[in-house]
Image: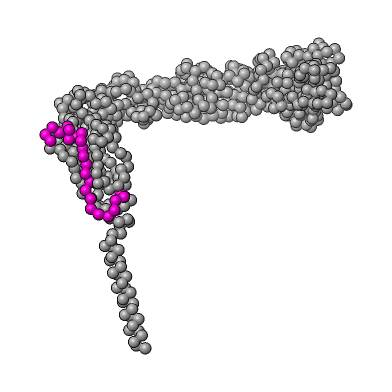
Amino acid sequence: MSTKTLRKRIALVAVSALGAGLLSVVAVPTASAAAGDATNVTANTTGGVAGLGTTSTPSTAADSTIGSVGLLAQDGEGTTQTAVLLATGTLMTSFTPTSTETATATITGGRFVAADGSSSTGGVISGTSGATASASAATESLSLLAQPSSGSTSMVITWYSSTLTTDTLTARITVTVVATSAYNKYAATYSSVYWGSGAYSTSNYSATTDATSSNYTKERAGTVAGAIVLADAYGNALTSSNTGILQVSVTGGALVGLGSATAAGDNSSAYSYIDGASLNVDDGNGILFNIQQEDTDVPANGTVTVTFGGTVVATKSYVIKGEVAKVTAGLAKIGTTQSGGSNAAAAYVKFEDSAGNQVLPSSGLSAVSSTLGAVVTSITAGTYSTSTSDAAGGMTPLTVLCAASGTQKAVQVQILNASGTIVKSNAWDAGCAGAPVKMTASLDKASYKRGEVATLTLTVKDAKGNPGNAYDTIATAADDLTFAGTPGTIVTAVAAGAKPSYSTGAKTYQFTVTADDGDYNLIVTPTTVKTNDTSGAQGNLTVPYSVTSVAGVTNADVLKAIVSLIASINKQIAALQKALLKK
């Protein structure tokens, strides 16, 4: 983009119809800048008449005597500059060549009507058609006024840095010529409504921030902030002369505050509006608004609709969560009584508001004391989740204290909301067990066919016969649990620290069956469990199984089919012999 200063920005014009075929060009304050600045285009003059100035040194800064008229928009640099000009307008363009070379220009779709150079001799326009122009001497700056030809819809101005033998293309301005102005009239092309946060900037409110869920989904008492940018068809921000009504309405039990990202609205009808005279959106600044709950304990799930002058600019959804209305406990594990019996993540809880939104509280959880007992003496919250996209899916882990082996029936937790309401969870049975000292093994089938998957289940118990806990390992090292005579290749090998799963008291391993037909014994050697069992009763485990042919076809099946085929052939031969004898 161009690095022109603000003083070089376009003084835009608004055009209004005064009668059939009559237009009046009215200068707009210079603060009303275009979407961008083209490097070689000068803004509208503040005096209302296009001019190159009264001095012999042309300036590219618009003032009361210097600048364009009827220029609606400009942008770009180098050979990709663009502008929008009224058919009745005049464009001012300037160029300074490289050292020792001469500034020259050509135009199509229009003509040059005035020239001025940086010396007393000025610039030269060639021919009556005004299609070319040049500075009077090398190294001089050259400024030109250009007007579109009658009926032209496009005008192209090309600048060269020239020598006697070479013209080097340096800049090109493609000008769109329009009969009437769309300046300061709302257009969707360059207008936007984005979710974001903080003070307005194009980085705080953008397509990226708009797609970030944390900007439009908030926890209880949170604030959703957005920014509205209203622009015309040329990318110019709307100015105070556009008195259209901007309205932001919200559904879902919330209030809208317009003009701030934080100041809460007080409109119980959930809408607000201001007129164009107070927009203050010069240079593309956004109009901030925010959404907050009418009642912070009640979820606000709804839609924000932004309209300007009765035209819908955008419709967007938002969520602000309410207080906890439901607590669901799950993913329970059997805890260990070993090493003090404290079991982190022995269960998880999910919090939801009355609308079903997952809520992320940061405090208030406790056990329902009446559901604790001799087995489980305490249940506390671990680290509260701060994101629904974390590894636990936004659920909060619970630490369960096991004082003895057994099962504590129907334990519960509860949460105290800021409003004072208490919400209890569902009940679950919390199991506790000592070290695993007993193991049994079983396969899911007695017979397999090659290509099938065999599942081996290892079930463990503590000394009191309680299902094995999910915290004490059944394989201190990978070779502390080994298998011999397996049906085939193990899918997931034994890892050091293997433990029973959750509340099952068991661990499973799978094998892809590759063994030949026959009868086999799978031998399990549970070294760690045998070590735990000081009585010496735990030994190796033997699990018998069989393997048959692929796809259910056994040798017996093949023999039976052969016998049947021979019998069929013999029958056909006998019938043929009988038929021949009759002849």
Q: What is the count of numbered marks?
A: 0
Residue 191 in sight: yes
At which x and y percent is residue 81? 70, 25
Say which of 86 and 436 sits in front: 436
At which x and y percent is residue 248? 52, 24
Say which of 62 and 160 sits in front: 160
User: Which residue is located at x 26 percent, y 40 percent?
Assistant: 508
User: Which residue is located at x 72 percent, y 22 percent?
Assistant: 71
> As displayed, is residue 451 above or below residue 298?
below
User: Which residue is located at x 29 percent, y 53 percent?
Assistant: 516
Toward the top, the furthest residue is: 55
> Which color scheme did the rendering employ for the protein?
one colour
Residue 503 in sight: no
Region in magenta:
513-536
Q: Quadrant of residue 53?
A: top right
Say which of 22 and 185 sits in front: 185
At which x and y percent is residue 161? 78, 22
The quarter of the image holding the N terminus is top right
Side of 406 relative to 445 (left or right): left
Q: Quadrant of residue 471?
A: top left
Residue 534 part of the magenta segment: yes
Side of 467 relative to 7 (left or right): left
The quarter of the image holding the C terminus is bottom left
Residue 528 part of the magenta segment: yes
Q: Quadrant of residue 320?
A: top left
At which x and y percent is residue 25? 74, 21
Side of 73 relative to 504 (left or right): right
